[in-house]
Image: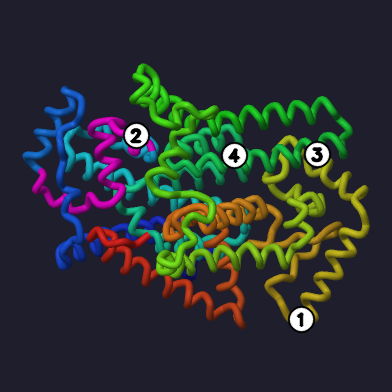
Amino acid sequence: MVQTSPHHNQLFVLKSAICSRLLLLTLISLFRTLVSPYDTSARLNPPCLSAVAAATAATAADVSSSALENGVVWDSVYFLRIAQCGYEYEQTFAFLPLLPLSIYPFSDHRPLLALSAYLVNNAAFVVAALYFYQLSLAVLKNPQTALRAAVLFCFNPASVFYSSIYSESLYALMCFGGMYYFVSGGNNLAVILFALSGCARSNGVLNAGYLCFQTMHRSYHALFHKKRVTLALQIVIVGALRTACIFAPFVAFQAYGYCNMCVGRSPDEIRPWCKARIPLLYNYIQSHYWGVGFLRYFQLKQLPNFLLASPILSLALCSVVHYAKSRPQTFFSLGFLTPMEEKSCGVVFFSNDLSRSEASHNVEKSPVRIEEHSNLRRRKNVSKGDVANVPIESETAAIWPGYMSASALPFVLHLGFMACTAFFVMHVQVSTRFLSASPPLYWFASYIMSYPGKYYRWGYVIWAYSIAYIFLGSLLFSNFYPFT
């Protein structure tokens, strides 16, 4: 990767994304041919419950021998069933509607639905990779580091899911697109894409945290620096409305599930969750059918699954801990002790309506101790020889480069919350794909590859881990063996 121009880098990312998808599809097809699947029942396609859809299912059964049926494994069965027959059973509401809705208009036949799902997901992945490069460039401010991070994403350990009939590709597209517009000042576009991410995966609603983070800092600045109570109140109201818009699609889907499963049913047919004060179908399904809950997965028999998830969780832990140790004031204060000059360099903390002159004016009134602490930390890092942690000098404050910049803080906090949820609450083996759309993983990996010395060798370990999981996932997952 010798390109330095962002345009050339973007073209390189496009080629890497396309090549990675072709590689995955080739591996999936090869391993499906060479290895006998553990479970062949996925090809069974019973008639839909509705009379109209039943005829469609019968027609699809005539072509069930299609090679496309071989790719319908694990959750793919549910997504295609929903696209073909709708939400028939309670447990199907665990799978959100964005993917089924994206492939439904193409055809009513199951093999053709599978083909359209493959096309939609792989195309979505390519666009997601391009968005991720633009996001990385906006946050890291370094074309080479951004390029390296984007290529790492193209060959990430959960790649098999991005080329299968799963919701990962659409989710990544909506997330990275929303994040890019968020750091670029397009909050309205960011809200729309974040809301759509909540239609792909339930954790998409956590993207509302980015808007909450910005609202928190903007309102604090308006109230305590500008002394404008009305402006602070306006910022809070707008932030609350935007957050509500992100939650709205997921809440609407839960309401749809309640109407389907609870309304108009006899007392004998009413499910327990229908009688709850807050009837959340999704939480009930995860707990009742899959045993998801706090510490419920901490069993000795699940040790292999913890080992399977240990690489991605270790990388997530290292990325968060390294940021926290390098910038403790910024991390533990949620960015409030970050010098104003650095916060004004992007729109993560403020919107475009905050001019640079206002920021500079506030820097003059900021405590001298912040700058003294930054200078002292710089001298300590230089004396230790830790070049990676030396911030770039500014006239008034320390501007930290790349992954250590203040603009990366909300993404690091988001990753920390997601990693804790994956480890303590979820089926831990899902962590590999659950965290695969978290930018700090790739930023941190690219960051440690940028500097020679003790960290550089870990770059080879990360690449070896990604390649091993690509081959392992293509072999196991595509043949219905447990993977992640």
Residue at 47% in and 26% down: 275
Crowding at label 4, few (<14), some or many (≥20) Cα neighbours within 10 Å? many
> Label 1, on which residue?
384
Q: Are marks 2 and 1 in contact (CB under 8 Å)?
A: no
Q: Quadrant of residue 305?
A: bottom left
Q: Could you give the CA–CA distance between mark 2 and mark 3, rounded to whole angstroms?
A: 44 Å
Q: Are marks 2 and 4 in contact (CB under 8 Å)?
A: no
Residue at 83% in and 74% down: 379
Q: Which of 254/247 is in front?
A: 254
Q: Do the residues labelled 4 and 1 touch (CB within 8 Å)?
A: no
Q: Is the magenta stretch mostly helix, strand or loop?
A: helix
Q: In which quarter of the image is residue 13?
A: bottom left
Magenta range:
64-93
Residue at 47% in and 69% down: 1
Q: Give the secondary structure at mark 1.
A: helix
Let me know if residue 92 is in the magenta part: yes
Figure check: 471 above or below 45? below
Residue type, label 2 = Glu
Give residue 281's position: percent from left, percent from top: 44, 34
Q: Residue 309 bears which disc, if any?
A: none
> Label 4, on which residue?
208
Residue at 56% in and 63% down: 316
Query: Of label 2 and label 3, which has the lower sequence position?
Result: 2
Let me know if residue 206 is in the magenta part: no
